[in-house]
Image (tube, helix red, strand yellow):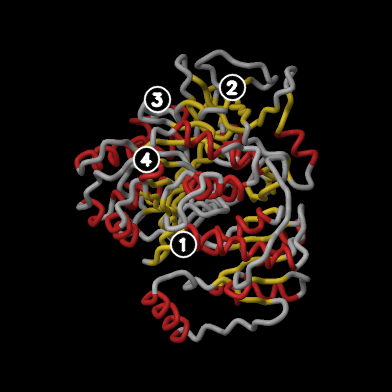
Amino acid sequence: MTAHMSMYEFLNARKHEREWENIVYFGKKMKFGKFIDRIDNLAYYLHKRSVKVGDNIAICLPNIPHAMIAFYAVNKCGAVGNVIHPMISEYGLLNIIKKTKPKFIFLADIFYEKYKEVLSDIDITVVICKMSGYASAIVKLGIKYKAWKEKTPRVPYGAKVVKFSKAVSRSGIVRVTTGGKDIAAYLHSGGTTGEAKTIVLTNYAINAVAINAYTTFDTTVEEDVAFMVLPLFHGYGLAINMHAFLSYGCKLVLVPKFMVNNAVKIIKKYKVSIMTGVPTMYEKLLNSPKFKKLNCKNFHLLICGGDNLNPSLRESFDRHIASKGSKVKLIEGYGLTEVVAVASVNTDKNYRVGSVGKPLNGVQIKVVDENMNELKRGEYGEIMITSQSLMEYYYDDPITTAQAVVTDENGTRWLRTGDCGYIDIDGYVFFKDRIKRLIIIAGVNVFPSEIEDVVSLMPEINMCCAIEGKTKEGKVMIKLFVVLNEGYKYSLTMENKIIKTCKDNLIQYAVPSKVIAKKSLPVTQVGKVNYRQVMQMDDEE
């Protein structure tokens, strides 16, 4: 297997047995042979409808088999998988479509009503994917009953709105030659500059992530079962959960939406050995009475990314699963969509508490000052990454691309991450915070994430966000926004407790001068607090 293939060819390179059960979805298993047949048939459908090399096809789907079939079919045609959050706003979807001009869009039936008005004035073919499509018979009945009870409008099929089942019904030959250098995917991200960006990735970049992850993790993927909840619009969900795990022979249990009780049932029923997720997922599991009773001996690889992992949560989770038979730890990874997914990760062999581990095979990381000079070990600065998985560019944005990707004197392309951290003497990477979030008070660096780590441990706190504020005299200070858990009421006593907790655990410059209680805080697509939007909030409830 080589990164120079197309992703479709990479998937097929291992020549898996057709009878191998590679996907489980709502109680029904799909064999690899059927999976490939559906991919080939859909590729033929798209090819016959003039989808050419370089075209892009929007895939706006949750974690359902249709999403993976669509992605690989698009790739086989030589087109680009334009992967979009399935619950994006109508305005957001319209912006992406106007910007990238896809020929087709794959939508879940349950979301068609939401987007139909936006799509009505656009020359685009909509392929409707039924959420019940590859589920067990009993689940199909349940979904149909729910739709009947809620009087869900029927989808008006026609020339421009077609059924997925119809699109995969016929077979034929697709003769297209593509390889590693060809563009495979558009992923949409906040970008290292803070503005919404469309990241352009090649087959080579995504294949390289799969290879690097496989050679870094000490895991026998062929014997593993992965709990797949991270969606395809997330680089990790696309490149590792789907592409790496499938290509190397891991069985995937697809989960469109994380619900803790359902998750525990799935982990127990299918003997899940691999999980990748965000901190809130592991926190919900740890707080679940059903998870606390679960035998954890099958766990083989547990990875957390997407947001800072609170040290206390990691320690509590590790302690619990060890008491239930697990021999592995919850490991934290670090990466950006601009390098597809993960760039560094703790492993059982290379593990250091508080760090995000060492770079994956094929990845180099350095830390530089504001003049781009490389710093010594232990010194804080901007984290830079070079990798085989580095993006090509931001779509239709050469100026921002030039700001984010720089070439050194040796011709090596480096990504300026916009993240602040350091590398210790042994080569472990420590991520602290976004440079844009770094707050300097009296010449001292204050990292909002450290404040949030401390405050979020309080039983009264549901979520929090620390940002820079100004006193009446114009001096820099810390403002802390908090959301309380149910059963707690904000008061002066509560405020004093929060301040005291900060004083007991942080340097004096990091203690908030003002605490503001809110009913809710804005969150990003992956569920972490959106600090940029918090910065626009007022101080009153």
Number of residues whose C-alpha sits closer than 10 Å to that of mark 3, classed few (under 14), some (14–19) or many (20 or more): few
* Left or right of residue 102: residue 323: left
Q: Residue at x 24, y 57 (%)?
A: 290
Would you place residue 110 above or below residue 104 in this image? below
Q: Earlier in the sequence, mark 4 or mark 3?
A: 4
Amino acid type at mark 3? Asn
The span from disc 3 to disc 1 (Cα, nearest Å) is 32 Å
* Left or right of residue 499: residue 191: right
Q: Kindly check if marks 3 and 1 are in contact, taking CB atoms under 8 A apart as contact.
A: no
Q: Where does residue 120 sit, x and y in percent of width and height? A: 73, 76
Amino acid type at mark 1? Pro
Q: Where does residue 98 sit, x and y in percent of width and height? A: 77, 61
**Pointer 1 residue:** 256
The span from disc 4 to disc 2 (Cα, nearest Å) is 29 Å
Q: Kindly check if marks 4 and 2 are in contact, taking CB atoms under 8 A apart as contact.
A: no
Disc ID at residue 301: 4
**Pointer 2 residue:** 367
Q: Earlier in the sequence, mark 3 or mark 1?
A: 1
The span from disc 1 to disc 4 (Cα, nearest Å) is 21 Å
Q: Kindly check if marks 3 and 2 are in contact, taking CB atoms under 8 A apart as contact.
A: no
Q: Where does residue 74 sit, x and y in percent of width and height? A: 66, 57
The quadrant where residue 114 appears: bottom right
Callout 2 secondary element: strand
Q: What is the tally of numbered marks visible in this picture?
A: 4
Depth check: give the residue in front, 9 or 215: 9
Q: Is residue 63 visible?
A: yes
Q: Residue at x 33, y 51 (%)?
A: 272
Number of residues whose C-alpha sits closer than 10 Å to that of mark 4, classed few (under 14), some (14–19) or many (20 or more): many
Q: Earlier in the sequence, mark 3 or mark 2?
A: 3
Q: Is residue 99 visible?
A: no
Depth check: give the residue in front, 282 or 303: 303
